[in-house]
Image (cartoon, grey):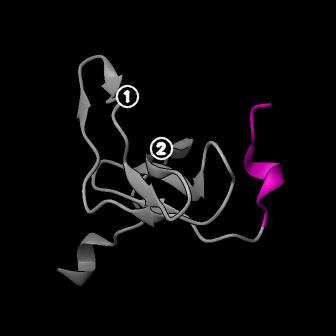
């Protein structure tokens, strides 16, 4: 079953440089995970490698939500 934004309406998100946004739960057991400090993207999209660690499953992937626009205000620089 594919999980969507509606399945986790009030859960925090993990956003990386470039706007890649994830829901920090394991794709296998749906427990909270510890996100990696980096995710890798290339011309072909996101890397299929694990991007988080689950206490039950070990290295895993978080649910990818999409690329979100940056909300950084350039006036703050």
Magenta stretch holds residue 4: yes
Q: Earlier in the sequence, mark 2 or mark 1?
A: 1
Q: Is residue 22 above or below residue 49?
A: below
**Any mark on residue 26, and which?**
none
Residue at 24% over, 39% down: 40
Q: Quadrant of the C terminus?
A: bottom left
Q: Residue furthest bottom?
A: 76
On the rendered structure, is 28 left or right of 10? left
Tag on residue 48? 1
Foreground pick, 29 / 49: 29
Q: As rendered, which of 50 and 42 lies closer to the eye?
A: 50
Q: Nearer the viewer, residue 70 or 73?
A: 70
Q: Which mark is residue 61?
A: 2
Highlighted range, magenta: 1-9
Mark 2: few, some, or many residues within 10 Å (few <14, many ≥20)?
many
Give coordinates of residue 60: x percent, y percent: 46, 46
Label 2 and label 1: CA atoms lie apart by 8 Å
| Quarter of image, res 72 | bottom left
- Residue 65 appears at what percent x and percent y? 58, 44
Dot 2 and dot 1 residues touching (CB under 8 Å): yes
Q: Secondary structure at mark 1?
A: loop
Whether 53 is drawn above or below 65: the answer is below
15 part of magenta stretch: no
Quarter of the image with the N terminus in it: top right
**Whether residue 76 is situated above or below residue 23 in the rendered picture:** below
Residue occupying image coordinates x 59% and y 52%: 26
């Amino acid at each position: 079953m594919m999980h969507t934004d509606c399945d986790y309406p009030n859960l925090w998100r993990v956003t990386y440089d470039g706007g890649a946004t994830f829901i920090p739960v394991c794709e296998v057991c749906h427990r909270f995970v510890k996100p990696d400090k980096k995710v890798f993207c290339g011309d072909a999209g996101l890397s299929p490698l694990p991007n988080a660690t689950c206490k039950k499953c070990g290295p895993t992937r978080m649910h990818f939500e999409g690329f979100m626009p940056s909300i950084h205000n350039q006036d703050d620089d």
